[in-house]
Amino acid sequence: MPPAGLTPWGGHAMQAPPAAAAGTVRGDVQGDVKNPSLGLAHQLGPVLISALMFSVSDIAGKTALESGSDVLTLLSFRSVIGIGLLFVWLRLANAPMALPPRAKWISLGLGLLLMLNLFWVFKAIELLPVSIAILTYFIYPLFTGIGGAVTGIDRLSWRGFAAAVVAFLGLALIINANPVRLDMLGLAAAVGAAFARMAMLLITRATLVGSDARLVTWYTLWSSMLVFVGLSLLTWNWHAPHTAAGWVGFVGIGFTTTVAFLTLYVSAQRIGPFRTALFMNLEPLLTAVLSTIFLGDRLTPLQLAGGAVMIAALCAFQLRR
């Protein structure tokens, strides 16, 4: 872990400005006053990038696993690549404001949730049909909306809840789930991953508004990397891919997941955890499209209909806001 008070770019961190100068806090946003020039691209750009990058990661991870790697090796290597990529980014970019000690510890804690989230998702995919694993995992938008409403972190109207339900039903059509011969441990892993993602979104919204997403990601990746690498060393587990395509996916997932989680944090602060989780329903749709292009899968008319239903629900939710 970087020494206290030092930043990834080698100097001492800049001090955050006084609270009065940090920007206004209004609903989902800090320092983001209504500005017509920002528009939908400013609001939805981060979450759309995040969904796309997670989808690319799904394809890359599947390619690496099918070529002989395993979950722990893949996630350990991904964590090291992610740390290196973010280090270079922070060296080249403008120095961000330092996180207060409390925010640093929260970010490190988010890394443990990230570790659980990633491990359980891939374990569910290992033990269940991919469609069942994804469907079960993507109950997290509903968990996030209900959890945010119960805790008072976010608002959830009946229209928002209805949109989440419709989007979930559309997702069920997309992945064409067929609940037969289900492994209970795999189902538990998928549900656990959904709760971990919900917790990450709600904690980010409740405690890290106004924090620099790059530094949040930096500390989050450090704690998750230390756990993954530590487990790999403890078990002396290493299964590298056996093909060139597998190595491309093996290395590429470190880049795509780093960008995905960085933009996810930005989105949670900018538009709130529930809307972020809801729009992340685009991830499996994009994954299905990319699978068609790169893995030779085919979308059925039923899956196309599910995609139309889901996108319509997302658009209706956005317009109601």
Image: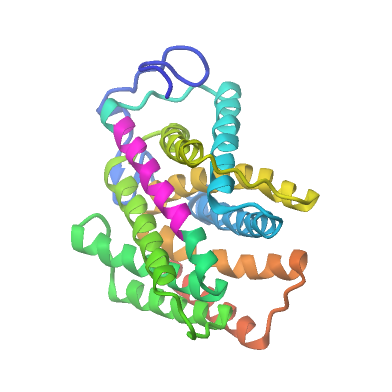
- Please state, as top left, top right, bottom left or bottom right, where the N terminus lies in the image: top left
Q: Is residue 35 visible?
A: no
Residue extending furthest toward the right: 244
Instruction: Determine which quarter of the picture holds residue 272.
Output: bottom left
Report the span colored magenta.
103-120
Q: Position of residue 271 (x, y in %)?
A: 40, 53
Say which of 44 and 213 sits in front.
Answer: 213
Q: How is the image coloured?
A: rainbow
Picture coordinates of residue 59, whole percent (x, y): 66, 59
- Please name the predominant secondary structure of the magenta segment in the image: helix
| 120 relative to 235, above or below | below
Residue 119 is left or right of residue 307, and the answer is left
Residue found 63% across the figure and 42% down from its top: 255
- Residue at 33% across / 30% down in the picture? 104
Q: Is residue 167 above or below residue 22?
A: below
Q: Is residue 28 visible?
A: yes
Residue 69 locus on image (x, y percent): 64, 52
Please give left or right for residue 16 compared with residue 125 in the image: left
- Residue at 57% of width from left, 45% of height from top? 73
Question: Where 191 sits versus 119, above or below?
Answer: below
Q: Is residue 243 above or below residue 139?
A: above
Position of 148 with respect to 182 (left or right) is left
The percent position of residue 286, horizontal first and vertical second, equals: 62, 66
- The quarter of the picture where residue 217 lies is top left
Q: Is residue 134 magenta?
A: no
Which image quadrant: the C terminus? bottom left
